[in-house]
Amino acid sequence: MEFAAVTLCFLVRDLPDGGREVLLGQKKTGFGAGKVVGLGGHVEPGESDAEAACREVFEESGVTVRETDLVDAGTVRFVFPSRPDWNMRTRLFVATRWDGKPQESAEIAPEWFAAHALPVDRMWQDAEHWLPMALGGRILDIDVVLNDDNTTVSHVTHR
């Protein structure tokens, strides 16, 4: 089975009251337009997953993340049985250190959300199955299989 190589990087900050926030963004164009998503995208030829994550965060938000500040959160494989050309192997990273303040780009309107109250009603349905675990420090190795509508989740397999 073929999978496109994709990365997602979640910037997380601690608040003075002990809470935590994660940077997500409203997707303005392309795949997933209108949904709240993590920062990330396709891995370019010759690029490592970490390099792609840093590049995508910068392109989408203007924030600079160093590879040494990325924390591995594992891998999610998204399987679209009715659209196999959409299959993605998504490498997840979390970062708590970066330079710059998130700015809107042509692709993403970044916004901070409470990590314990993710806007799952505005995200891809699969996010609730894995994002809280990734933000909670787990290293994931899961498959998310979508239904034929390419939106709702058929099942999730933890490896």
Image (cartoon, rainbow, N blue to C red):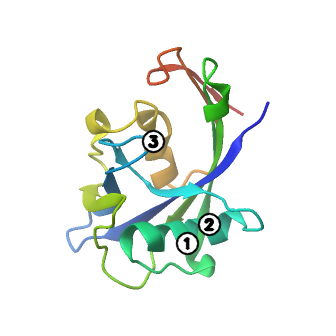
SS for dot 1 = helix
- At 46% across and 45% down in the image, what residue appears? 131
SS for dot 2 = helix
Q: Where is residue 132 in the image (x, y as percent from the top left)?
A: 43, 45
User: Do the residues bearing badges 3 and 2 touch, measured as CB atoms within 8 Å?
Assistant: no
Please name the residue that numbered disc 1 is placed on.
Answer: 55
Q: Where is residue 133 in the image (x, y as percent from the top left)?
A: 49, 45
Residue 94 — which label? none
SS for dot 3 = loop
Q: Nearer the viewer, mark 3 or mark 2?
A: 3
Q: In which quarter of the image is residue 44?
A: bottom right
Residues 41 and 144: in front is 41
In the visual, does 159 lie left or right of 118?
right
Q: Residues within 10 Å of mark 3 (few under 14, many from 20)?
A: few
Give above or below for 27 relative to 79: below
Please name the residue that numbered disc 2 is placed on.
Answer: 52
Please name the residue that numbered disc 3 is placed on.
Answer: 31
In the visual, does 135 lie left or right of 4?
left
Q: Earlier in the sequence, mark 1 or mark 3?
A: 3
Label 1 to label 2, Cα distance in Å? 5 Å
Residues 35 and 144: in front is 35
User: Do the residues bearing badges 1 and 2 touch, measured as CB atoms within 8 Å?
Assistant: yes
Q: Position of residue 1 (x, y in %)?
A: 79, 30
Residues 84 and 57: in front is 84
- At 28% across and 38% down in the image, what residue appears? 122
- At 50% across and 78% down in the image, what residue appears? 65
Amino acid found under the numbered disc labelled 2: Ala
